[in-house]
C-alpha cells in the first residue's frame, strides 16, 4: 500500500511503498535536513515535527536530544522517526541545511530558468459563416498577435486542439515549444508542468516539476521492473542478446512504470498525464538505449560503443510515455558505453567544470562512474565495482532498510557496537554498515593490510571450510547472529579495489596526487550514508581530510530536473559532455597493478 | 651456491618482485645453472607457494597478481633456454579470452598456475576471434583448449567456438575447458565443455585430471 509524505514548508510530496525513516524519505525527496552525526542520533540537529506522530516512541538518547520538545506533539529526530502512513513532516528552519548547494540549486532558481515549453492563454473569436477560417489558422493568427510567428502543430497536437477549442468555448491554453504547438487545453491549466526521470538500474526516480518556476512539486520512486530480467546492466544486456523480444519487454515495462508514477503525481496536484508538457530522462547508457529501443548488443561487448553521444529530442509518444499530444522527451547525451547521461546530470548539478578546484566526483553503485576535474580538464571512467556496497554477495548483506546495521564501531576488546536502521533488532548489514565494519576491523587489527582475518581474536570463529568469520551482532529474541565472513571481506575489497584503481588512474592521468584534491563529491544513496572516515580508512577514497568529502544525494535527479526546466542547462550540459574525456580502463597498461594496489588496505 | 640462488628466485616470485626475479634468473643461467632446476626449484616453486598461501587464506588477489607478474618476468629469460634444453611438458595448453572481452587478469593467473603445473602455455591474449582459436588448435595441436570470459554477454561466444570445433572435425582431438566469473558447471555442460574451472587453482587441478596426471 503506497502512501504520501509531504514535506513542509518546501511542499514536496514523496510517494512511498514501505516504512521509512523521515531522514531517508527526505533524502529521496531531495529535501535537505541537517545531520552532523550522519544519522547516529547523537547531534540532535535533525529535529522535525511529524503529523500524525509516529507510532513508536523515542528512545532515551532521542528524548534527551529533543530537549523538552514533546514527542506526543510529533517532535522527533528525523533519523529515528519511522513513517508508515500518510504523513506531513514540518522541517523547522534550524533543521534545514543551508549549504546542501546541490539540492537547493536544483529546487529554487536564483533567476528565471529558460523553460523549453511555455503556456499562452488565448481568447478567440469563434468561427461563423462570415468567418470560416480554419482552427489552426485562427490559433496561429492569435499567436501572431502575441509575437509568435510561424506557429505550427503536428498531427497529435492538432487532434487535441480541435476538441479543446470547442470544449473551452474558444478560450484555450496553448503549450508552445518554440513556435510548435505541443498541446492545447480548454481554458487555463493550473500550471505548466513537466516530468524529470532518473532511470536507475535499480530504482527509477520521477519528479513533477513546474515549468514556470522550476520548482519540484512531487517526487516518487519506483523499483525498475527490468530487475526481472537481471539485477545488473550486463544481465539485462545479455537478456536482450539472447532474445530481442526481451529488449522490447524491458523498454515497455520501464516506461509503463514511469507512466504509472507520473499519473499518480499528476493526480495529487489535480492534473493528468496529458498535462505533462515536456519530459527529460537520464540514465546509464544501457538504460538509455533500452528505453529508447536502440540496439544494445554493441554495448555488451568490446569496444562498448553507444549509438550516439549527443542529446536527442524524441516525441514522448514514440517512447510510449503518456504526456501532452506533441510533448517531447529530452534525452541528454551519454558519455560512453558505461558512463551515461545520469553521470552527466550529476556533474551538471554538482557544478563540475565551473571553477578551478580539483574535484573528484563518484557515483557509487554496481558500476561506479568517476570524474576528475583539474587543470581545466575533466576526465572520466567507469569501474565494475559490483554490488557489495548494496549488500549483494555479502552473506548477511541487505539493502538499507529497517533492521540493517548501518553504523559500526569496534571497541578495544574487539566487540562491535552497531546502529540499526529503525532502532530495532539487527537482521542484516547494509552498505554503510559494511564499509564501517571493514574499516573498524582494519583499525583494530582484526584484519591485516591484506584483509586477512586473524582467527585468534575474540569474536572470530573458524567456519566449516577453514575460513574465519567475525560476529558483528549476537542475535537476541529469536533473531540470528549477524556475521561478516572472510569471503564477505574479500567481496568488499574487490569492490573498493576497482573503485580506487579508477580514482588513482584518473589522478595519474592528470599528473596529480591525492593531496591535491580539494573536494570529493559522492552521489547516490550509499554516498549519503557512508562515513567519510571509514571510506578513507578502507582506502576506498584517497586520504583527504573528511570535511572535504560531501554527499550530494540523487544529484542525477537534480540534474535531470535542471535540464527539464531550462534550455540553458541543456546547453551547459552539452558543452560539459563535449569537454569530458573518457578513459577506457581495460586498455590502461598496468591496470592490474592499480587494481592490486587498490585492494590493499592502508596502514592503520 | 646454486641452492641459495634458486631459493632467492623462489622468494622473489612469491613476493611479487618482478624485476628482481628476472635479474636473478638471468644471473643464475649465466652462472651455468641448469634451466630445468631454475624452473622447478626457483620459478615454479615460487608461484606454487603463492598458490598455497592463497589457498591457506594468507594471500589474497593482489598478492597473487604480483606473484603472477613476477612469474611472467622470470620466465622471459628462461623460456628460450628451456626450449633449447628440450624440457618435458604435460602438453600444450592454448588459452585465450573470447572476442569482445578485454579482461586479462584471470587468464594471467590461470596461465601462471598451468605453467607451474608443467603445461606449455600458448597465450592467445584477449578479445580473440573465433577463427584464431580454431587456427591455434590446428597449428599447435594442444591437449587442452581453455576459453575465458568475464562478462555474461561475452561468454555466449564459447558455444559457437565449440560448435565450430565440432564442425571442423577437431572436437575429438582436444579437451576443452571454460572459465571466468559468470561461468558455471551448468554453463560448461550446456556448451559441451569437458571441464569447468571455478578459479585458477581449481583450473590447474582439473587440467591435470584431464591429461590423466
Image: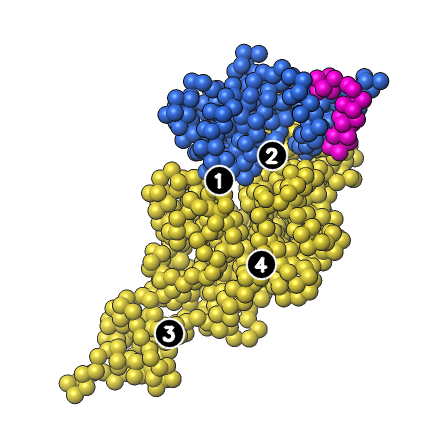
Instruction: Supply the letter of whichever chain is blue.
Output: B
Q: Which residues are magenta?
A: B17-41
The answer to whether B116 is drawn above or below residue A90 in the figure is: above
**Mark 1 residue element:** loop
**Mark 3 residue element:** strand
**Mark 2 residue element:** helix
Chain under numbered label 3: A
| Residue under numbered circle 4 | A580
Question: Which of the pair A564/A534 is nearer the observer?
Answer: A564
Is residue B63 on the magenta stretch? no
User: Can you give x and y, in whole percent of width and height, for residue B172 in the image?
Assistant: 42, 18
How far apart are the alpha carbons under marks 3 and 1?
46 Å
The answer to whether A522 is drawn above or below residue B158 in the figure is: below
How far apart are the alpha carbons under marks 4 and 2?
28 Å
Tell me the tag on residue B105: 2
How far apart are the alpha carbons under marks 4 and 1?
25 Å
- The structure residue drawn at horizontal position 44% and vertical position 70%, both measured from the top left corner, is A116
Give the class, few, some or many, for how many residues have Cα within 10 Å of label 4's Cα (few <14, many ≥20).
Answer: some
Q: Are marks 2 and 1 in contact (CB under 8 Å)?
A: no
Residue A393 placement, left or right of A141? right
Labels 3 and 4 share a subunit: yes
Q: Earlier in the sequence, mark 2 or mark 1?
A: 1
Q: Are marks 3 and 1 in contact (CB under 8 Å)?
A: no
Q: Are marks 4 and 1 in contact (CB under 8 Å)?
A: no
Amino acid at each position: 500500500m503506497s502512501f504520501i509524505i509531504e514535506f513542509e514548508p518546501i511542499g514536496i510530496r514523496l510517494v512511498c511503498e514501505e516504512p521509512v525513516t523521515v531522514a531517508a524519505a527526505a533524502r529521496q525527496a531531495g529535501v535537505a535536513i541537517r545531520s552532523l552525526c550522519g544519522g547516529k542520533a547523537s547531534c540532535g540537529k535533525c529535529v522535525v515535527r511529524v503529523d500524525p506522530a509516529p507510532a513508536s516512541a523515542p528512545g532515551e538518547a532521542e528524548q534527551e536530544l529533543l530537549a523538552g520538545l514533546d514527542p506526543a506533539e510529533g517532535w522527533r529526530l528525523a533519523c529515528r522517526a519511522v513513517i508508515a502512513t500518510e504523513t506531513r513532516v514540518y522541517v523547522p528552519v534550524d533543521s534545514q541545511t543551508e549549504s546542501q548547494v546541490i539540492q537547493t540549486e536544483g529546487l529554487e532558481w536564483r533567476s528565471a530558468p529558460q523553460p523549453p515549453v511555455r503556456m499562452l492563454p488565448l481568447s478567440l473569436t469563434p468561427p461563423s459563416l462570415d468567418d470560416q477560417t480554419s482552427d489552426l489558422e485562427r490559433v496561429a493568427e492569435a499567436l501572431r498577435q502575441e509575437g509568435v510567428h510561424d506557429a505550427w502543430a503536428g498531427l497529435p497536437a492538432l487532434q487535441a486542439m480541435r476538441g479543446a477549442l470547442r470544449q473551452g468555448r474558444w478560450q484555450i491554453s496553448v503549450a508552445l515549444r518554440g513556435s510548435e504547438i505541443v498541446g492545447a487545453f480548454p481554458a487555463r491549466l493550473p500550471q505548466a508542468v513537466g516530468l524529470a526521470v532518473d532511470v536507475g538500474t535499480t530504482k527509477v526516480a520521477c519528479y513533477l516539476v513546474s515549468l514556470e518556476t522550476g520548482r519540484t512539486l512531487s517526487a516518487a520512486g519506483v523499483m525498475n521492473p527490468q530487475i526481472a530480467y537481471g539485477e545488473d546492466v550486463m544481465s539485462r544486456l545479455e537478456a536482450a542478446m539472447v532474445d530481442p523480444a526481451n529488449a522490447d519487454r524491458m523498454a515497455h515495462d520501464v516506461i509503463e512504470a514511469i507512466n504509472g508514477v507520473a499519473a499518480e503525481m499528476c493526480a495529487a496536484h489535480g492534473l493528468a498525464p496529458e498535462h505533462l508538457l515536456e519530459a527529460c530522462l537520464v540514465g546509464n547508457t544501457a538504460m538509455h538505449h533500452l528505453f529508447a529501443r536502440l540496439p544494445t548488443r554493441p554495448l555488451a561487448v568490446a569496444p562498448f560503443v553507444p549509438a550516439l553521444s549527443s542529446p536527442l529530442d524524441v516525441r514522448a509518444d514514440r517512447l510510449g510515455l503518456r504526456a501532452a499530444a506533441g510533448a517531447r522527451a529530452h534525452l541528454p547525451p551519454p558519455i560512453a558505453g558505461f558512463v551515461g547521461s545520469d553521470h552527466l546530470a550529476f556533474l551538471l548539478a554538482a557544478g563540475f567544470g565551473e571553477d578551478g578546484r580539483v574535484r573528484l566526483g563518484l557515483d557509487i553503485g554496481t558500476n561506479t562512474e568517476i570524474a576528475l576535474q583539474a587543470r581545466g580538464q575533466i576526465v572520466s571512467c567507469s569501474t565494475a565495482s559490483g554490488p557489495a556496497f548494496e549488500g549483494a554477495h555479502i552473506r548477511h548483506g541487505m539493502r538499507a532498510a529497517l533492521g540493517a546495521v548501518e553504523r559500526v564501531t569496534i571497541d578495544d576488546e574487539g566487540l562491535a557496537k552497531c546502529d540499526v536502521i529503525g532502532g530495532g533488532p539487527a537482521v542484516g548489514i547494509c552498505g554503510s554498515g559494511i564499509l564501517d565494519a571493514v574499516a573498524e576491523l582494519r583499525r583494530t587489527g582484526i584484519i591485516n593490510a591484506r584483509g586477512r582475518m586473524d582467527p585468534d581474536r575474540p569474536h572470530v570463529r573458524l567456519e566449516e571450510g577453514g575460513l574465519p568469520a567475525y560476529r558483528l551482532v549476537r542475535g537476541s529474541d529469536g533473531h540470528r547472529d549477524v556475521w561478516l565472513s572472510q569471503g564477505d571481506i574479500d567481496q568488499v575489497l574487490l569492490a573498493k579495489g576497482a573503485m580506487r584503481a579508477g580514482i588513482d588512474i584518473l589522478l595519474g592521468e592528470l599528473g596529480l596526487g591525492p593531496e591535491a584534491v580539494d573536494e570529493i563529491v559522492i552521489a547516490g544513496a550509499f554516498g549519503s550514508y557512508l562515513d567519510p572516515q571509514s571510506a578513507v580508512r578502507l582506502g576506498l577514497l584517497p586520504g583527504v581530510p573528511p570535511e572535504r568529502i560531501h554527499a550530494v544525494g540523487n544529484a542525477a535527479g537534480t540534474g535531470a530536473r535542471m535540464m527539464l526546466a531550462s534550455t540553458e542547462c541543456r546547453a551547459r550540459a552539452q558543452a560539459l559532455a563535449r569537454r569530458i574525456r573518457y578513459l577506457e580502463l581495460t586498455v590502461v597498461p598496468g591496470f592490474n597493478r592499480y587494481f592490486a594496489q587498490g585492494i590493499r588496505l592502508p596502514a592503520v | 651456491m646454486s641452492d641459495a640462488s634458486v631459493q632467492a628466485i623462489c622468494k622473489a616470485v612469491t613476493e611479487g618482485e618482478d624485476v628482481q626475479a628476472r635479474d636473478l634468473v638471468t644471473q643464475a643461467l649465466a652462472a651455468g645453472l641448469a634451466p630445468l632446476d631454475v624452473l622447478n626449484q626457483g620459478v615454479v616453486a615460487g608461484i606454487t607457494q603463492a598458490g598455497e598461501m592463497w589457498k591457506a587464506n594468507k594471500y589474497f588477489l593482489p598478492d597473487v597478481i604480483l606473484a603472477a607478474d613476477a612469474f611472467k618476468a622470470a620466465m622471459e629469460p628462461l623460456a628460450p633456454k628451456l626450449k633449447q634444453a628440450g624440457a618435458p611438458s604435460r602438453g600444450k595448453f592454448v588459452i585465450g579470452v573470447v572476442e569482445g572481452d578485454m579482461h586479462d587478469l584471470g587468464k594471467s593467473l590461470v596461465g601462471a598456475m598451468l605453467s607451474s603445473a608443467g603445461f606449455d602455455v600458448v597465450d592467445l591474449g584477449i578479445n580473440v576471434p573465433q577463427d584464431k582459436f580454431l587456427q591455434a588448435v590446428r597449428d599447435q595441436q594442444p591437449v587442452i583448449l581453455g576459453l575465458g570470459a568475464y562478462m555474461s554477454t561475452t561468454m555466449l561466444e564459447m558455444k559457437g567456438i565449440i560448435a565450430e570445433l565440432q564442425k571442423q572435425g577437431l572436437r575429438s582431438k582436444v579437451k576443452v575447458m571454460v572459465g571466468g566469473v559468470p561461468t558455471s558447471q551448468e554453463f560448461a555442460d550446456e556448451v559441451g565443455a569437458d571441464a569447468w574451472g571455478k578459479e585458477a587453482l581449481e583450473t590447474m587441478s582439473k587440467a591435470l585430471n584431464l591429461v590423466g596426471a
